[in-house]
Amino acid sequence: MSDPTRVVLVDDHEVVRRGIRALLNETPEFLVVGEARDGAEGLELVRSLRPDLALVDIRMGGHDGPALCRAIRDEHLPVAVVILTSFLNEELIQTCIRLGVRGYILKEVEGFDLVQSLRKIMHGGSVLDPKATELVMHWLQSGPGGGTAGLNAHDLDILRLVAEGLTNREIGRQLYLSENTVKARVNDIARRLNAKNRVEAVMIAHRHGLL
């Protein structure tokens, strides 16, 4: 049996942290190893504990979620960051995507769906709440984005599967490619679209009518 995914919770509401801890600790593949009340405490925990996953709120006293995401990116800390928040704001979503978050999930999510989303993320996927997707689509349709970069039919097949939320391994199984090959292809597609990550690559492709 593989080691559980080690999780840090960063949220200024103790009740929320307790609830998420209880939910994740019911699942053997997740282990909550630390809790923080704001981004500054969260950064110290990520530095010291080196968790696999950080569940981060947006608005907290002091150091907020985007500031923590920026610090994690700038320090190249090997942790998957997922925003779990009640805030649905186009500018915040843009900022978080640009900072490389792997998921943006609203707190109204059902417990089962949250666990499924985290599983998907830890297997190489990305998750964007449907309500957040609508705002991202508006952003991409009304503002500058990347070009189509000469994507071929095979590239678009990969992007469609990414858009469906499949992990690199699952995409590889469908397209008869190795997981590493899929990862390299997704990274190359994102680079050619001037996208910060796979979520933004999908949104840019949607904007250009490619998906």
Image: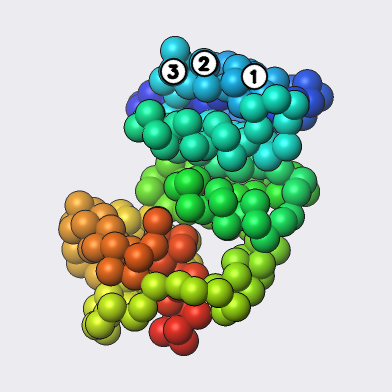
Between the C-alphas of marks 3 and 1, the distance is 13 Å
| Location of residue 211 by image quarter | bottom left
Q: Which mark is residue 146?
A: none
Q: Quick check: 40 above or below 87?
A: above
Residue at numbered disc 2? 44
Q: Residue at 70% across / 25% down in the picture?
A: 62
- Distance, label 2 to label 1, CA atoms, is 9 Å
Amino acid type at mark 3 = Arg
Measure how far apart labels 2 and 3 are at the Cα level. Answer: 5 Å
Q: Are marks 2 and 1 in contact (CB under 8 Å)?
A: yes
Q: Quadrant of the N terminus?
A: top left
Q: Secondary structure at mark 1?
A: strand
Q: Which one is closest to the eye, mark 2 or mark 1?
A: 2
Kind of residue at badge 1:
Ala
User: Label 2 sits on what residue type?
Assistant: Glu
Question: Which residue appears at 52% of the width and 16% of the height?
Answer: 45
Colouring rule applied to residues? rainbow
* First along the sequence among labels 3 and 1: 1
* Callout 2 touching callout 3 (CB < 8 Å): yes
Looking at the rendered structure, which numbered label has been put on residue 36?
Answer: 1
Residue bearing the label numbered 3: 47
Residue depicted at x 77% and y 46%: 86
User: Quick check: 24 left or right of 120?
Assistant: right
Q: Please identify the residue farthest to the front as the structure is shown.
A: 144
**Mark earlier in primary sequence (2, 1):** 1
Q: Is residue 10 above or below residue 82?
A: above
Classed neighbour count for the residue bearing mark 2: other residues with Cα under 10 Å, few (<14), some (14–19), many (≥20): few
